[in-house]
Amino acid sequence: MSFKFALVGNPNCGKTTMFNEVTGSTQHVGNWPGVTVEKKEGKARRFKEDIRVIDLPGIYSLSPYSLEEIISRNYILEEKPDVVINIVDATNIERNLYLTTQLIELGIPVVVALNMMDALESRGDQIDIPRLEKQLGVPVIPTSANKAQGTKELIEKSLQVAQSAATGQLGESITIFDEQIKKSLDELLSFITPQCNQVYPPRFATVKLLEGDEIVIAKLQPNSAFMALITTTRGRLEQEYDNDMETIVADQRYQFISKVISKSVKKKLSVGGLTVSDKIDKILTHRILAIPLFLLVMYVVFTITFGFIGTFTIDYIDHLINVTLADAVTTLLHSAGAAEWLDSLIVGGIIAGLGSILVFVPQIMILFFFLAILEDSGYMSRAAFMMDRLLRKIGLSGKSFIPMIMGIGCSVPAIMATRTLENEKDRRLTIILTPFMSCGARLPVYALFAAAFFANAQSLVIFSLYILGMVVAILSGILLRKTLFKGEAEAFVMELPPYRIPTIKGLMIHMWDKGKGFIKKAGTVIFAASVIIWFGQTFDFSLHMVEEVSDSIFGSVGAFIAPFFAPLGFGDWRSSVALLTGFVAKEAVVATMGILNNLGEVGEGSVELMASLQTYFTPLKAYAFMTFTLLYMPCIAAFAAIKREMNSWKWTLFTVGYQTGTAWIVSFIVYQGGKLLGLG
């Protein structure tokens, strides 16, 4: 027998850590049907039963205010999981229990995972678990997902609840509302039950109709007589409580939660006292020091990644691929009597192309590891809070910073994340600006050119490109807000999680989640691109093999488009072709450089490629080239994501044109300005 368990909880409650701990490496990542919000699904480990665990988007309530809330609510109500596991942050139990009351109201099997108990106990607080269970009417399991404590017991209890529910055995429902509202709900229930048609639980539907939930109204389509009764009841209650219905319901929930907390939770911290997180925030979110400290932290990350650890890995991987592997493959092909063109394709095309990319994988994984530390510790949430003041000056809110910071990993999920922005102008502006935040796919280009031309200042040069991307995004935001996107930014409210010490296991999982896409792309897109690039530099338009690469298909195409880039300092045909293939994937820029510079001979690799680049690039030209790579359209996948999210060819083409035009202008300023300063 198989079971479906849905994980539901507030953002930053440890839900992802719980999911990873329960499922391990069995997770499957996809998208919810019809939308682009990522979902994760995996199989629970160490259980003989077939238990599928679905990680729903982090939400604060089941009200239809955001896409995530609608997705989670629809999944619970329509897919009907066997058990909803509600992850509750024990250190912030008051806020988290609001969602719990709504889940209990659905009348479905619920198990509460009281997570982060280790953090709660470390500050001297206590929770009476049996009493909390009795007040909520559902099982409560204390857990610390980051330490793998209580997770096995949680799944075991959920399995028991699912098996009991299958036989119709559910616990008694609790009363959340006062007698007056409960009486009104009971009166309405007899009318609404026949109309629910098993779409929504009757009590949940009644509360939502009273609140004026448009989605529930549209789904149930109650008759005019019943809607008139709803309207009359709502008007009477709003008059009696002197407030609107949504606020009345919310107040009732919080009153219930207050009673639960007063009887179940003992807090050691006196009112007004400061937690460790509060004390750290006094420095890290300081009005003046916050942004300089953030930049310092990021600079240290880049220095360690590119200035220390990462540089030791390049020579080893380079020798392994471009010497050991290439030599072995060449020997094998020669002994098999393979044709010269096949040897050229495999060694000079595929190995040279993939090898040019894979040598930088360790650096990219190291960068993602440090970014995972910042994310898991809670610092990235502070970064969004800190950037709110800066972004508001360009007409955006700190909410837009979240997709932007995701763009450091990959532009595609970052563009998808803009769906959390409710304001259409804010969403479109964020989509346009997000690709200016340098994604991981551009890192091999920076690493290659920084190592070739700025050996003693690699980390500083690469860090400056990330800062340049942010500056261009800010200036573009100011320009576009004053022209195409006039209006005020939406309000930004964000709950800051307490600082936590990340676990090695969690960091490794997050690092792999972000880095595996890069490796997968190398094995698919870059593999195919390497073959195409080899073909384009081996044959001419008459499909004859050429002696000189400049006479090939790519040589002709590169010579045709090179004048477009000449004012930027890199009018060489090889550079032009590399940027053209970069439209497919930014990693292909390096692969193209490796193949077009004839590095297919055994024993040649990244060191030889750097030496070759130095024959027609200068440091100034190299920086201008990296600037263009930073700012022009990310890749085909990002283009598709922009089209899907904009839902308009006009806005999509404008976005691509604006990004590429901006790249040309900024690169022109860098190169021509550098020449005027005598740097050329």
Image: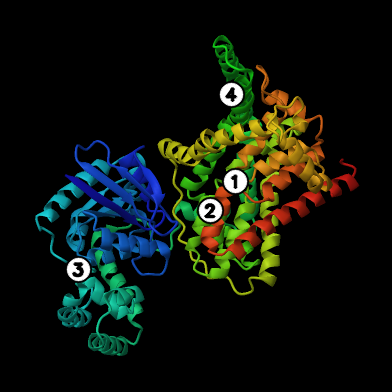
For the residue carrying disc 4, how many other residues have a C-alpha within 10 Å: few (<14), some (14-19), or many (20+)? many
Q: CA distance from mark 1 to mark 4?
A: 29 Å
Q: Which residue is mark 2?
A: 414
Image-based side of 381 in relation to 326, left or right: left
Question: Residue 439 has which mark?
Answer: 1
User: Measured from the top left, where is residue 267 in percent x and y?
Assistant: 32, 57
Image-based side of 241 in relation to 375, left or right: left
Amino acid type at image mark 2: Ala
Amino acid type at image mark 3: Gln
Q: Residue at x 30, y 42 (%)?
A: 22
Q: Residue at x 79, y 30 (%)?
A: 614
Image quarter hosting the C terminus = top right
User: Measured from the top left, where is residue 422 in percent x and y?
Assistant: 49, 68
Q: CA distance from mark 1 to mark 2?
A: 10 Å
Pointer 1 or 4: first along the chain: 4
Position of 571 relative to 13 (above/below): above
Element assignment for label 4: helix
Amino acid type at image mark 1: Cys
Amino acid type at image mark 4: Ile
Q: CA distance from mark 3 to mark 4?
A: 60 Å
Question: Residue 346 has which mark?
Answer: 4
For the residue carrying disc 1, how many other residues have a C-alpha within 10 Å: few (<14), some (14-19), or many (20+)? many
Q: CA distance from mark 3 to mark 1?
A: 46 Å
Question: Residue 198 has which mark?
Answer: 3
